[in-house]
Amino acid sequence: MNLQQPSTANSPVIVWFRRDLRTSDHAALSAAAATGHPVLPVFVLESGESDNGSASRWWLHHSLVSLRKELAVLGLPLVLLRGGALEVLLGLCARSGASEVHAHHQYEPSDAEREEKFSSALSMQGIQMHFHPGTLLSEPTDLRTGKGGPFQVFTPYWKAFANKVRTQEPLPSLDRVRSFEARDIGVSLESLKLLPSIGWDGGLRAAWNPGASGAAKNLQRFLAGPVEHYDSQRDLPHVQGTSQLSAHLHFGEISPRQIWHAAKATGPTAAPFLRQLVWREFAHHLLHHFPHTTDKPLRPQFEDFPWDGDPSLLSTWQKGETGYPLVDAGMRQLWTTGWMHNRVRMVAASFLVKHLLLPWQEGAAWFRDTLVDADLANNTFGWQWTAGCGADAAPYFRVFNPTLQGKKFDPEGAYIRRWIPELQNLSKRWIHEPSSAPALELATAGVTLGRDYPHPVIDHAVARERALDCYRRMRMNNQ
């Protein structure tokens, strides 16, 4: 039975905020405002979102605080609800008399099927469901290979993107929007229980400013200087050479086309950064076409990979106690700030799967729990790339030497000194390999191996040969 009341000039249009927690360049909000009806913004905390990692939940709490302030400037409330989104939206429409719901598309596995289900269920109640693009620069289905299939290598994807995708300008800013009075609807932000019950989040608070204003400031900082040197400095973890916009993008506090056009306006030096934005598009393209890759390798032969590592070493890696300073510094930065420099992510991930021979899924799960930018597409792509089992993957036989990586990308040891203060008095000659330092050097620096800093959990040469042997065994089993 259709419970929906006939639409009137005063019936509201609902804007369902998802991972698009901003008011600028927001297609769903703009479309709702253009109807002339009162607008009712709503965010629904679903069970899957409350199960997300602790760092992501912390960010979400503060992003909702920011969104509420932004909406207030437009004269709009933010209604917070929890439960199954379909049931919640149907109930809200029945209660408020809304006949339209606007939202942005999302692109994780099953989202397309889920959105179709929502549209059908709301339509049966006389409610129009509108999904808008707005979280990517292009839809995951927009680009195809010459044979009509999905891309699995970035360079051809990048060429197709550059030739075919025309990124539209951001939407004009909204002024005040007609509001629907939402009395006695919704729950308090505190009742969502997104913040930790114990105060481990001091490092997050010191490192980040969630919300659209924080995203804008980060973009301004980046475009004012670092973007010019992005190609040469983005691999240096001791330099603030990256945009640090990943979490803002993940929660939709800034749109990718806002970033794209602002960066492009700075001139040709932004080209390497723009290419990096398209890597994000590529990750979503892959996840859309290969949804099983969240748990299983894209390359099926890797399902037989002999993970022969010691499971007890997973916690050693998580705590940053492997005895390899660059790896440990990255893991400690992650735990403290919810973020890790991308070059160090590659080294730390490689260490888990190739030195410790532990499954990449374990690392992906840890990153999902601890990253503020725990984007499923990027996280899945990055871990499969490192493990050699995904699209455009690094060859499995490429095993990063953590010591050499540290010497190359953190030559003075500044990054390591920042995150491993117990090694700060070691000279740059030995800070990347304290286990090889002369006794006098260690004594002068006040470092006792095994007490102040651990011995390496495995020798690099031994680990490399063991990993390659496992790779050879896998190949033999697949012949």
Image: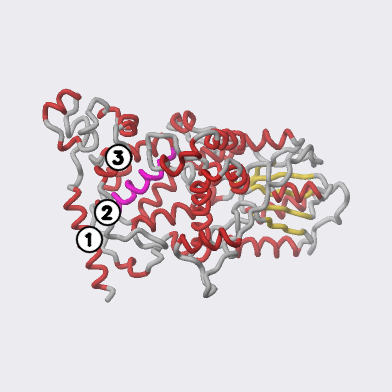
State if disc 3 and disc 2 touch (CB < 8 Å): no
> Crowding at label 3, few (<14), some or many (≥20) Cα neighbours within 10 Å?
many
Where's residue 434, x and y in %? 19, 35
Measured Cα–Cα span from mark 1 to mark 2 = 9 Å
Q: Which residue is mark 3?
A: 326
Q: Residue at x 77, y 61 (%)?
A: 125
- As rendered, which of 38 and 453 lies closer to the eye? 453
The circle on residue 399 is 2
Amino acid at circle 3:
Leu
Amino acid at circle 1:
Leu
Where's residue 195, x and y in %? 51, 36
Q: Residue at x 79, y 48 (%)?
A: 96
Indicate the secondary structure of the residue bearing disc 3: helix
Q: Which residues are magenta?
A: 338-354
**Marked residue nearer the N-terminal end (2 or 3):** 3
Question: Where on the picture, by quarter, is residue 448?
Answer: top left
Q: Residue furthest right?
A: 9
In the shown orientation, is residue 140 left or right of residue 355? right
Where's residue 68, x and y in %? 67, 36
Q: Quadrant of the N terminus?
A: bottom right
Q: Is residue 205 above or below residue 344?
A: above
- As rendered, which of 39 and 388 lies closer to the eye? 388
Where's residue 422, x and y in %? 26, 28
Q: Residue at x 59, y 53 (%)?
A: 136
